[in-house]
């Protein structure tokens, strides 16, 4: 309990801090707001709603409506206590963060039925009002006990429909709610079903001349009315469905609408109401749009989903988000993924020459539209420098004439080498007479590539996807937004020449990466390119979609006792200094201890210092030196800058063991003139790339002749090392027979297995 409270206090400070940064809503969060004193004033003081999910974290005043189906057991004779406890915990945490939360709850009837189980068996005619009368006190006692676990006080507010159509009771109601909020108490509003449930009063019974507002027929409309009156920032309507579908969810072709605007009202069909409660989906949509029109953002979600409230406030794509803003509205990422799947199939129908032609076109555009690209990149660099982006990331972000020319050359390599990738026959086997089996290469499907800082990744990855026939979604870092947009225009232009412009798309919406990682129905492989933190995070979050990549690039160069000193200096300098931000740059230099008696250690240190490299010493080197470089904090660290560690090893075997202990399986180098030692190193070191007398900087798709790479994989399944077109292919089996059946090969079936290998 104390741990929870400490965490909550920390969250409170964080939320208050984030509130203060939200300038456009600052006026609404400076102090607890009181409901407007008159309906006319409330109408003239309409505040703007949130236009994006990412802004929901700034919601201060929340109304959470719990539908009957959410908190009722499937037998309708009791409450789903575990689910209710989770919701209470989330509401309590929001309250302790400093948010103002009100709950509109059902459940009194179900609770009463549970307590009156025996009586119900004896009296089948018992009215729900009696069950509600029995259940109301028990329901509130349950809420009181649950919230007390978190030190949160609650108050019950019972309402009926007439309360909203009598100006005096209406004014008193909202004054009471306002006072409870100011006293740091969570109001729990439920209808007084024992007296007169709201839906039992017809609109015709309302006194003439009374301001109606929204017709209150259920808890959805009640919640909408309350949200508007108390000027809530966010209304969460929790039901037993995931959100709004374009048609009843059980029908073919039904799709969840993650975002809903008033323009969508004509494009959806509503199904039947829930078997418990009174509010159907049509009612929820009407209530949501009514509240939205009065300045309240709304999300309709499945209350049975774990941590739904906290996930919504975190900006994740849960349920249906109602917004009136369509300015700059982008295509939903689900549609982009479906288009990528369709585009992949279009690419597969093209000839290899047509796919290569599209890549050649893109390569030419990189040169012919150089000025257009560099102008966009200059904007990103200016913004990045103003925002204090680290130098290694600035280096990755920067484009130049030379980079674009090299990119163009690499793309042409991809195009020229791609003619026999898709549909290449790997194996042919004659299983039996007139029954031939063929294994051929095919695209993986739809790729999601997430990259940071490096806009040059975009045309490289797009070209590899086009050449391999894969659909592609690209999610770039915001620091390269202008560059990525410009480069994406060129990709689309090149794809248009072969009629496959849908195959590649840039995801420019603000979905959390975690939302993209959950799209296992649409995405077949995720490839992260960026910092070790980004890659590791994606590997941890992606539960169902395979991830290809490497979390770190801790590369080693080992200078053996039989090394040529000048070669060693040249290779070490290039491996560390050519591009220190690259994942294939040297991070640790290993030196054979026999060389410490000569000049090599001083020569290496002097060379690195002249290049501006900051040196750290490993534990063994640190013990040998009275004065020397500061000790390295970790031998597993990827510096990504002009910094490196130097360590001493006693022999070749010690170097191999060091690499296996501290390396990341990326790229390792031995510098030696001893061929036996080199061969042992190349065979023993278990990394994706192992080199003899060559810089680690050669671990690159372009330098390997692959044209480019989607990334470097340190995994051992599928692709390893720089991943080019071949790493983006899988296989399928094609079987051609006449009228063969498995029974033909059983005893007495008459057919005989041959399993003969045929020429490819």
Image (cartoon, helix red, strand yellow):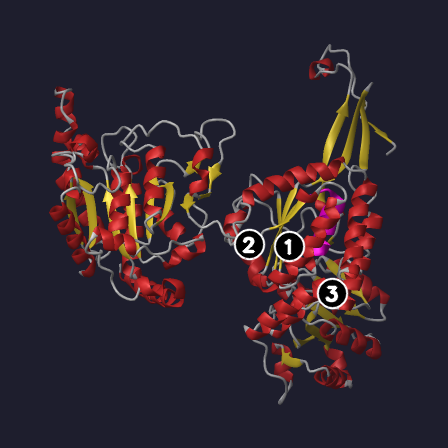
Q: Is residue 150 left or right of residue 234?
A: left
Q: Tell me the number on the disc at residue 371.
A: 3
* Along the line of sight, the residue nearer the viewer: 682 or 726: 726
Pointer 1: what residue?
A: 549
Residue, x 74% and y 73% (percent of image)?
A: 578
Q: Is residue 54 left or right of residue 608?
A: left
Under circle 3, the secondary element is helix
Q: Magenta: predominant secondary structure element?
A: helix
Q: Is residue 434 left or right of residue 88?
A: right
| Residue 634 at x, y percent in the picture | 57, 72
Mark 1 and mark 2: Cα distance apart in space: 10 Å
* Outermost residue, bottom side: 627
Mark 1 and mark 3: Cα distance apart in space: 32 Å
| Residue 80 at x, y percent in the picture | 28, 37
Pointer 2: what residue?
A: 538
Residue, x 68% and y 80% (percent of image)?
A: 613
Q: Quadrant of the C terminus?
A: top right
**Where is residue 712, by image quadrant?**
bottom right
Q: Quadrant of the N terminus?
A: bottom left
Q: Is residue 221 left or right of residue 677?
A: left
The segment highlighted magenta reads 459-470
Numbered label tally: 3
Q: Are circles 1 and 3 on residues that touch, CB within 8 Å?
A: no
Q: Are circles 1 and 2 on residues that touch, CB within 8 Å?
A: yes
């Amino acid at each position: 309990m104390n741990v929870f409270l400490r965490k909550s206090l920390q969250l409170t400070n964080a939320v208050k801090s984030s509130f203060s940064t939200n300038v456009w809503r600052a006026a609404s969060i400076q102090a607890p707001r009181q409901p407007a004193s008159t309906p006319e004033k409330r109408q003239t003081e309409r505040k703007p709603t949130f236009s994006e999910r990412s802004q929901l974290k700034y919601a201060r005043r929340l109304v959470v409506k719990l539908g009957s189906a959410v908190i009722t057991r499937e037998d309708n004779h009791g409450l789903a206590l575990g689910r209710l406890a989770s919701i209470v915990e989330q509401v309590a945490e929001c309250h302790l963060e400093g948010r103002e939360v009100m709950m509109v709850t059902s459940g009194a009837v179900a609770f009463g039925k549970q307590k009156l189980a025996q009586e119900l068996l004896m009296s089948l005619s018992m009215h729900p009002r009696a069950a509600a009368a029995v259940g109301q006190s028990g329901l509130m006692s349950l809420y009181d006990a649950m919230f007390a676990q978190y030190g949160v006080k609650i108050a019950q507010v019972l309402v009926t429909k007439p309360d909203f159509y009598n100006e005096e009771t209406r004014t008193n109601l909202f004054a009471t709610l306002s006072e409870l909020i100011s006293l740091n108490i969570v109001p729990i509003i439920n209808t007084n079903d024992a007296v007169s449930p709201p839906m039992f009063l017809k609109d015709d019974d309302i006194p003439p001349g009374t301001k109606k507002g929204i017709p209150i027929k259920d808890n959805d409309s009640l919640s909408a009315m309350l949200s508007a009156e108390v000027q809530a920032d966010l209304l969460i309507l929790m039901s037993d469905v995931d959100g709004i579908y374009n048609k009843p969810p059980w029908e073919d072709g039904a799709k969840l609408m993650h975002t809903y605007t008033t323009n969508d009202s004509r494009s959806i069909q509503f199904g039947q109401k829930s078997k418990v409660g009174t509010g159907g989906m049509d009612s929820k949509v009407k209530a949501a749009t009514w509240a939205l029109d009065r300045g309240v953002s709304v999300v309709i979600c499945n209350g049975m989903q774990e941590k739904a409230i906290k996930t919504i406030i975190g900006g994740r794509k849960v349920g249906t988000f109602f917004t009136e803003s369509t300015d700059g509205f982008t295509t939903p990422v689900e549609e982009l993924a479906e288009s990528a799947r369709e585009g992949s199939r279009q690419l597969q129908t093209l000839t290899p020459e047509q796919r290569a032609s599209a890549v050649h076109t893109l390569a030419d555009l990189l040169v012919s539209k150089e000025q257009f690209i560099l102008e966009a990149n200059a904007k990103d660099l200016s913004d990045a420098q103003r925002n204090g982006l680290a130098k290694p990331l600035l280096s990755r972000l920067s484009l130049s004439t030379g980079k674009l020319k090299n990119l163009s050359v690499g793309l042409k390599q991809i195009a020229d080498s791609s003619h026999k990738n898709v549909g290449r026959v790997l194996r042919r086997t004659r299983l039996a007479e007139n029954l031939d089996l063929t294994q051929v290469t095919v695209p993986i499907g739809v790729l999601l590539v997430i990259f940071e800082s490096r806009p040059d990744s975009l045309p490289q990855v797009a070209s590899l996807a086009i050449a391999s026939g894969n659909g592609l979604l690209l999610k770039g870092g915001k620091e390269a937004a202008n560059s990525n947009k410009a480069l994406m225009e060129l990709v689309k232009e090149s794809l248009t020449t072969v009629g496959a412009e849908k195959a590649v798309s840039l995801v420019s919406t603000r979905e959390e990466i975690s939302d993209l990682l959950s799209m296992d129905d649409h995405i077949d492989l995720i490839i992260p390119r960026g910092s070790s933190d980004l890659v590791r995070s994606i590997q941890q979050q992606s539960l169902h979609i395979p991830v290809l990549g490497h979390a770190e690039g801790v590369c080693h160069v080992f200078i053996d006792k039989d090394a040529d000193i000048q070669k060693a200096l040249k290779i070490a300098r290039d491996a560390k200094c050519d591009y220190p931000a690259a994942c294939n740059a040297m991070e640790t230099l290993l030196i054979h201890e026999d060389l410490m008696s000569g000049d090599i250690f001083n020569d290496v240190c002097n060379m690195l210092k002249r290049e501006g490299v900051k040196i750290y010493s490993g534990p063994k080197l640190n013990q040998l030196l009275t004065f020397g470089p500061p000790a390295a904090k970790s031998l597993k660290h990827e510096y990504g800058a002009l910094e490196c560690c130097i360590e001493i090893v006693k022999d070749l075997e010690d170097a191999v063991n060091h690499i296996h202990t501290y390396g990341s399986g990326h790229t390792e180098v031995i510098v030696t003139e001893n061929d036996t030692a080199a061969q042992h190193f190349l065979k023993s070191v278990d990394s994706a790339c192992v080199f003899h007398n060559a810089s680690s900087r050669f671990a690159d798709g372009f330098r390997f002749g692959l044209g480019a790479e989607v990334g470097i994989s340190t995994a051992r399944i599928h692709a390893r090392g720089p991943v080019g077109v071949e790493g983006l292919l899988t296989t399928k089996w094609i079987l051609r027979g006449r009228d063969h059946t498995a029974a033909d090969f059983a005893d007495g079936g008459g057919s005989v297995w041959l399993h003969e290998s045929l020429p490819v």
